[in-house]
């Protein structure tokens, strides 16, 4: 694995022959005030599109409502802004279109579910729920919410599951609830309480999140790179993404550094 500060950013030629400006915050998805550098980068690029890691509802609705997302990002204090929030503010400033290029929500949950289904249906249900809840808890910790409001976290994610998760997960949630299904996963992994799990997450949160997503990561990489390629062909995109994606694309020879566009 390449150290984050050594992963390049700048103009890249994609394997389809088109170019895109691809960058990362250098501080992970939660750079805080340091993420302001993303605005400076995108101002210099003056892109037609700004692509962010956000899960749209489906493949057809990748264009995001700037007014809503700008308001959401702007209201967050600088020290709590994610790299995507800084990218939204940057795109608004230069008048670029905002594009969500992560795997659509329904497909995202389906990919995770299918990756665990070969072990058992029940394991696939609780592991899919656990993957999403880990990210919910991790994000809350990263933005300073400790202790975590568990009831709110479960309520928010339950709504998402009921809208976008595969049918077996929806049925299980309606019967047992997200909280009980997540507790079953914790017991499977040897945790006796939510508090014990959160303590573990504080130490190993990033690695655990990537580990849970690993089985479905190949499908995700292919999807998001396909969207980047599509908009590189259409115009002048600036892509703000986690550094590990850039590392993967470099290793697969999907991109290579090139001169300014």
Image (cartoon, rainbow, N blue to C red):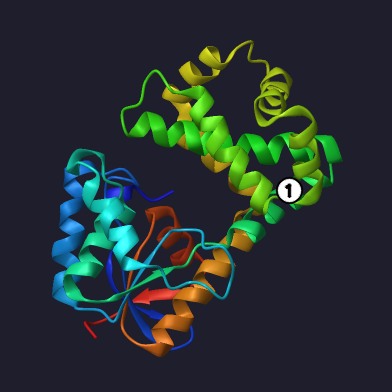
Neighbour class for label 1 at 10 Å: few (<14), some, many (≥20)?
Answer: many
Q: Work out whether 248 lies above or below 119.
A: below
Q: Name the residue under label 1.
A: 113
Residue 47, picture quadrant:
bottom left
Residue closest to the eye, 13 or 41: 41
How many numbered marks are there? 1
Q: Work out whether 238 lies above or below 233.
A: above
Is residue 12 visible in the rendered image? The answer is yes
User: Which quarter of the rendered picture does the C terminus lie within?
Assistant: bottom left
Which secondary structure lies at badge 1? helix
- For this orientation, the residue located farthest to the top is 192
Query: Image check: 123 left or right of 27?
Result: right
Q: Work out whether 165 lies above or below 49.
A: above
Residue that appears at 58% across and 62% down: 104
Residue that appears at 27% across and 55% down: 71
Provide residue 91's location: percent of width, then percent of height: 25, 69
Is residue 254 visible in the rendered image? The answer is no
Residue 255, picture quadrant:
bottom left
Residue that appears at 42% across and 81% down: 231
Residue closest to the eye, 177 or 204: 177
Provide residue 36's location: percent of width, then percent of height: 16, 53
Residue that appears at 68% across and 41% down: 128
Q: Work out whether 164 lies above or below 189.
A: below
Provide residue 22's location: percent of width, then percent of height: 32, 69
Residue 87, picture quadrant:
bottom left
Provide residue 68's location: percent of width, then percent of height: 34, 60
């Amino acid at each position: 694995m390449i150290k984050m500060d050594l992963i390049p950013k700048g103009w890249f030629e994609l394997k389809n022959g088109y170019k895109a400006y691809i960058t990362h915050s250098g501080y992970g998805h939660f750079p805080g005030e340091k993420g302001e550098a993303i605005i400076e980068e995108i101002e210099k690029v003056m892109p037609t599109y700004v692509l962010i890691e956000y899960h749209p509802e489906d493949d057809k609705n990748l264009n995001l409502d700037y007014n809503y997302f700008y308001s959401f990002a702007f209201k967050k204090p600088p020290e709590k802004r994610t790299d995507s929030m800084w990218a939204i503010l940057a795109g608004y400033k230069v008048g670029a279109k905002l594009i969500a290029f992560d795997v659509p929500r329904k497909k995202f949950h389906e990919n995770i579910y299918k990756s665990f289904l070969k072990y058992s249906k029940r394991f696939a249900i609780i592991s899919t729920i656990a993957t999403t809840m880990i990210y919910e808890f991790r994000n809350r910790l990263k933005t300073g919410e400790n202790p975590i409001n568990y009831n709110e976290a479960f309520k928010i994610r339950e709504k998402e599951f009921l809208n976008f998760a595969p049918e077996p997960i929806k049925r299980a949630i309606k019967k047992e609830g997200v909280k009980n299904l997540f507790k079953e996963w914790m017991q499977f992994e040897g945790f006796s309480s939510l508090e014990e799990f959160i303590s573990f997450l504080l130490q190993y949160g990033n690695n655990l999140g990537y580990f849970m997503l690993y089985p479905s990561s190949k499908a995700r990489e292919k999807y998001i790179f396909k969207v980047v390629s599509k908009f590189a062909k259409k115009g002048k995109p600036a892509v703000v993404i986690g550094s590990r994606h850039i590392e993967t694309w470099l290793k697969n020879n999907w991109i290579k550094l090139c001169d300014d566009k």
